[in-house]
Amino acid sequence: MDQFFAARIWGAFGRLCATAEMAIATCAAESRTSTTFDDHLINVFRDVAPEKHEKVSAFIDTYTAMIERVIEAGRQGKTGHIETIDFSDEDDDVQSVVRLVANGMMKFRSDVDRDRYATDAAMMSITSALEVLCTELLRSLFELHPRAIPGNPTIDLETVLSLPSTQGAVAAIAEKQAVEIARGPVEGWLSSLASHCGIKLPKRTSDWPREWLSVVWMSHQRNCIIHRGGSIDSKLREKASYCGYTIPSDHTVLTLDPLEVTRFVSCTLTVASRLTIGFGDSHLAKSENSHPNWKTARTWLAHEQFEQMSRGQFAIARAICPESGTLSNEVDITDVARWYALLTTDGIDDAQREDVRVAKWTSEASYQIHRSILLDDEEEIRNLVREILDRGYLTALELRHNPEFFLAKKYLDLPDK
């Protein structure tokens, strides 16, 4: 049973990582520099005879004014006929330019909308994937500890009769309640889940750590897009304020920045990894039988981080933070992915190969140390540190001050000098 819980939770975590990779790729594509509408105008005017520039500009101004009137009328709730502009008496060049500009305006608007929809989809996907993981954690919690289920939930008689045992009834209620809770305000169930995972969050949501507030704000934005089409109201502005964000006063529709969504993805992974390991340490590692199974899940987490690094997904690897004993407050200082980058260095001349060989070995050692810390394997960490020193790859002084081995030093409580 314990192994079943660990595998089920890890499946949800793996789905979250896959979604994060997709979201980051989407945001990276949408944040690249693209051709603007001004560029389009410049390209058109470049091929128009100078003596026709003034006439073309006049038509463009007229067309723009018409669009603005239509937009303003729509804002005021008015309806009516779409205006038309007659330029049939002009020569072919002028007619062609006006048509090109009009089509260009529509295409540019369409491209902007497409980019916005893609960014919205990335944000909604990662938020939903986190909720799937949290629902799975709640479900597992309730199955392990039925008395933790809030209220006095019931299931219908037909469902009870179809279940093979009392444990089956508990599992059915646990799943139902977990799904129901996850539909409520994110601040409530996230705070409750964190406490069950041994994570103490401040009572006031506005005092939560940055990563947790980012997750809350992302959830509110997702709900705004789904239920209000992105329309901003006073409630959303209030939620933004206590999450530490500001919506410009002149904005009426929510607009997501791809770079901001990428940062949200990183925060989501950090929160998810802390909840997952915290849950395992608090509930799956309590009995003698479950402890090995949860250590296996910790191994999965270490492998997932290394897998992301090997795929070049350094942002994801960096965000999967280990939470291990006294290291929980220090782990953000390290950046394991940076050391793995040494393994993929190319274009090196012969004179540098020895340095790279050493760097490669220490990078691999750094990963092994990092993995051993996740597994609370103190003996393995000491063996690796001893090997580094015995082989002469690093001196004791370098070991103490090399950030690559910061976690090992903290874990083993090595002196600074």
Image (cartoon, helix red, strand yellow):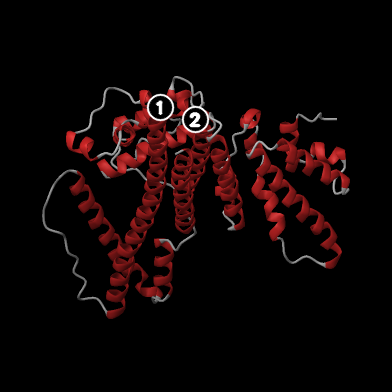
- Residue at the (33%, 66%) spot, across then down: 104
Q: Would residue 126 be seen by someone viewing this image from the given angle?
A: yes
Task: Residue 247: tell me if it is visible.
Answer: no
x, y percent for residue 261:
45, 46
Q: Nearer the viewer, residue 43 or 323?
A: 323
Mark 1: which amino acid?
A: His
Q: Quadrant of the N terminus?
A: top left
Give the image location of residue 189, x and y in percent: 38, 29
Q: Residues within 10 Å of mark 2 (few under 14, many from 20)?
A: many
Residue of label 2: 283
Q: Secondary structure at mark 2?
A: helix
The circle drawn on residue 131 is none
Outermost residue, front direction?
164
Instruction: Classify mark 1: residues with Cα within 10 Å, few (<14), some (14-19) or many (20+).
Output: few
Residue type beneath disc 2? His
Q: Which mark is residue 145?
A: 1
> For residue 319, which quarter of the picture?
top right
221 horizontally vs 198: left or right? left
Secondary structure, mark 1, is loop
264 displayed left or right of 110? right
Residues tagged 2 and 1 counted as in contact (Cβ below 8 A): yes
N-terminal of the two: label 2 or label 1?
1
Q: CA distance from mark 2 to mark 1?
A: 9 Å
Q: Quadrant of residue 53?
A: bottom left
Specify the quadrant that holds the C terminus.
top right
Residue 51: horizontal and vertical position, in percent? 37, 74
Total marks placed = 2
Q: Spot the residue most to the left.
A: 80
Between residue 53 and residue 192, name the one nearer to us. 192
Q: Vertical placement of 117 versus 246: above or below?
A: below
